Amino acid sequence: MNEEQMKNSAVIEESMNKTVGRKVSKVKRWFNLLLQSKTGTVGLVIVIFIVFVAIFAPILAPYDPNVVNPTEVHKPPAWMEGGSNKHILGTDNVGRDILSRVIYGSQISLLVGITSVILAGIIGIVIGLLAGFYGGIFDHLLMRLVDSFLAVPNILFALVIISVFGSGVTTLIVVLGITNWVVYARMVRGESLSLKERDFVRAAKSMGVKNRNIIIRHLFPNVISSFIVISTLSVATTIILEASLSFLGLGIQPPQVSWGTILSDGRDYIATSWWLATFPGIAITITVLGIIFLGDWLRDILDPRLNK
Amino acid sequence: MEKKRVFIIGLILLISLLVACSNGAKKSGSDGGGTSSTNKEDRTLEIALGTDMVTFDVHDHVNTSTESIHVNMFNYLFKRDNDTGEIEPELVDTYELIDDTTWEMTLKDGVTFHNGDELTSEDVKFSLERVAHDSNLLDHINYNQIKEVEIIDDLSFRIITHNPEPALLNRISRIGSAILPARYIEENGMEHFLKEPIGTGPFKFVNWIRDDRIEFEVYEDYFKGKNEEWDKVVFRIIPENSTRVSELLTGGVDLAVNMPPSDWDRINSTEGVSLAQETSNRTLMIFLRSTEGYPTADKKVRQAIDYAIDNQAIIDNILHGSGVPTITRVAPGNFGFHEDLYDTYNYDPEKSKELLKEAGYPDGFEMTFHSPRGRYLQDAEIAEMVTGMLSEVGIKVNLEFLEWSNFVEMRNAGENEDAFLLGLGNSMFDAANALDWYNYERFEGQIDYLNEEVEELLEAAEQNMNVEEREEQYKEAQELLADDTAHIVLHQESINIGVSDRIQYEPTMDEMIYVETITRK
Amino acid sequence: MFNYLLKIIAQIIPVLIIISFIVFALVFIAGDPVALMLPEDASTEDIALLRESLGLDQPFIVQYGNYLLQLVQGDFGESFRYGEDAFKLVMERLPASLELGIAAIIVAIIISVPLGIWSATKRNTSIDLLATGGAVIGKAMPNFWLGIMLILIFSVHLGLFPVTGRGTIAHLILPAVTLGTGIAAEMTRLIRSNMIEVLSQDYIKTARSKGLHSFKVVYKHAFRNSLIPVITITALQTSTLIGGTLITETVFSWPGLGQLLIQAVHTRDMAIVQAAVITIAVIVILMNLIADILYRILDPRIKYN
């Protein structure tokens, strides 16, 4: 081992030690930052609550969300005239319990929102890392592909794809995944372009570390924080996008139920039975609010540019 | 310095946006629509529809909503009187049955197209033979019974059919029966006609902006006399139900079709508008697949499904009481109507379970049910309710909603599973059209229902010139079908139109909107 | 500058080819529209005949090749549904959509600029929470729900605006607010973070320390500097904006591209879908280009390279 190599390995070691050492103080630092940010606290509480509801939906929901009842249609919420404690948030146009539907709806809405973003993230990160690291013709092609996807509105892409393949939870997740991946690909590519010029990557390279290992060990951990920041916001947009697709008649199929479909099914009754569309609407609004607040807070913590 | 420049450029940008905007607004400023007031002197009639017209090719749409627009600019040779149910001559003056396959007719004198051309036998020949001979046209199947039209003189002609055709007059008084201007089309081409169509009707075409509006103006030289009520008729396309209702409530339109049941009370309690209802000639049905391998191939299973569904509960709770339960598709007012099968239904969950047990499904079974959404009155809600009712007797239904074009495609490809929901109208007002759905060959690979006895009866009736005997044959066929529960007939739909108080309008069973019958109060 | 433009064009052409390929492939997989064009009881021969006459029996790559050749000649094909030139139909509808889009941007600017600045100056206070919260609610409300609510409140109950139709400013307000609210939320957030950055710059701090009134500092110095990002942010919202018009136009029966496009997707009117998607892509690319150029003009620190 010559002198230079030794120096390089020292650099790597140092950067690794930093990461380990950071972990302990990080939790504390995060917690402090959380308390500093009112919005962050609110966001976190909301998100935890919604996730809790989604996980324990079968226990929390008073009824099966799909049981219809011809004699109990359009029953108003309990506190209104004609309402009863049997259906706290009332019933819908075929007599299903709204509270149960909204509770169960959280499952699909979150599932679609989170998994499609993860899918988009995986595709985007892999392609972005490769393009950024290797560059050349692959990078060139990728950027054109990214431009193409960015030039067509998400919802339009989803509209065309779903009308071709039919609507279902899986299709929806895949569709939203492949319409969103470019955002991550572009971001990751940019980050890895600058990362590969950094000392510790150069050092690793000169020590003969395999490209694959450099990407996995050095580039990947460094792009993950940017990913988390963007992806929280994507979860929010995806939940709304799902509702919009339901509106266009391309939502998910029964017996599955999402906030988007409840809201969209209830839209004809906004003037006459307002509770059909209002409660899923409130659920979406609160969730998106929570996620965006949480996302902003995460950005403040994780985005080094704003952290100076 | 630099900051100032930034500011100025920003300002210029904002202003140019504003200018562009107001320019855009001005350019399109001709007729905004939605502004028609309740002014009694306003001679523009605005009608809100849920879907756009398909085409001006009268032979190529088979679409009731499209036809409801066409009837205002075209005429048929005959027209069904919605009050009496009789088929009356319209463009025709005199007519006579020469033999079983030949009708001789004379046109009214002095009928003109919107370009001034006189209506002649040539036009009749062109129109009827076009649809009778061109198998690419959607309505071909309903007109291919016609062999040819023989011209006698300018106003007289003979319609010759391949076989005896007892329902010919029904056939030529419906969708696809409009008489087109032969010379105009031959000189300018069909494409030109589709862009600037002319007919003989009371209103002439002005403009069609896709998915937005179709405009007509009164035709001065209409052969029954110029319409004195309206100078202009505008059909506006407003797909969202709630928007269409709102537009009616605010006086933006005079008529609005397909008012959802949940808004009926609201419409009736709002000053200035009311709801006009009529029974439609459309029947909502669940088609079951009789292909071998499907549980529904078994008569007992089909009956079990029938007995599990409470038709009246659907009508009462989903349709707010409007609709008539029935077990046949042939409604009153149609030739071949069977009274005993109408305004009745089968419902007995216990018997249903019993039948399932007998059929070998004591624990029920699983089936797939396809339904369109937003095509028929409360179709999605009805499908969901049916799904719930079937689960009560142990049948697990996987309900799948499809967008209309996917729905049509699925059926054409024979990819439909155990059951699908469909609402069928009958513009012929003859059982021949309604019962054609039990023709095995026509839906082979899609429905596969075969009942030889029924087929024989239908074949015999199709060419039977003896009216009474023919009626009996259709009635018998319906009895056999009901007994075999070929499909599930749910109910006869209702027509629900929101009407402004400034006009007088009665909906008709054929779902057409005859502007001629609409008057200002 | 010339080289810059040349480079941009060299980038745009492959993008358009990729888009046309993706959409063409999707429509191809979807199956041809022949089944929809014939009656419910058409025979298989009828279907085969029509398919052949439309050239739909050819292999995929041949069909796509033919399509590209036509595209180069400016021919987007004919709409199955309307029997008219697809591109012409799209162009007929574009003005209405542009009008709505521009009005929505104006609404969004009116809402987001003051709100963004305000919340930035009151960072992390309850006012900030309220302002950003309000903006987020605007984003979180699905467009169609907001549109229906606005109609019910402002048209049906208050009778202030017409429900549908186009032609006057009154017709434009409700759809523009519906569409504008969604993008206003995004813009508020971006303007806020931009302002925070500007406010932390040294010269602002200096101005403040000199004792200048904070209102003056914010609006004279900080706001002007945050105008550049406002312009680019606005341009970058084009894609979201067009996506939003699909929904808003349906709710208000606005006679723009949205209605035409949605119907075309549902009826597999391939020519219109293609023409519309490519037109939209060109608009988005152009807007981004304009933003880029403006940014370079306004901020001389960035060089053409």
Image (cartoon, coloured by chain):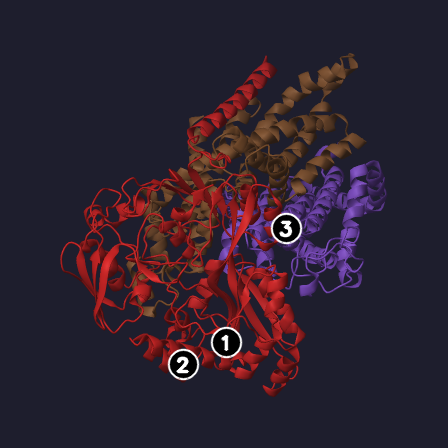
Chain colours: A purple, B red, C brown
Quadrant in the picture for residue C278: top left
Label 3 and label 2: CA atoms lie apart by 44 Å
Amino acid type, label 2: Val
Task: Give the residue at x 22% y 42%.
Answer: B116
Which residue was labeled with disc 3?
A269
Q: Amino acid at mark 1?
A: Asp
User: Does B444 appear above or below C244?
Assistant: below
The answer to whether residue C179 is visible is: yes
For label 1, the crowd category at 10 Å Cα-Cα, with few meaning under 14, some 14 to 19 and many 20 or more, is few
The quadrant of the image that shows the C terminus of chain A is top right
Inspect this view and state whether residue A208 appears.
Answer: no
Amino acid carrying mark 3 in the image: Tyr
Per the model, the C-alpha gap separating discs 1 and 3 is: 37 Å
Q: Which numbered disc, 1 or 3, marks the residue closer to the eye?
A: 1
Of the numbered discs 2 and 1, the one sitting upstream in the chain is 1
Residue on which disc 2 sits: B454
Residue B340: image tag? 1
**Chain designation of label 2:** B
The chain to which mark 3 is attached is A
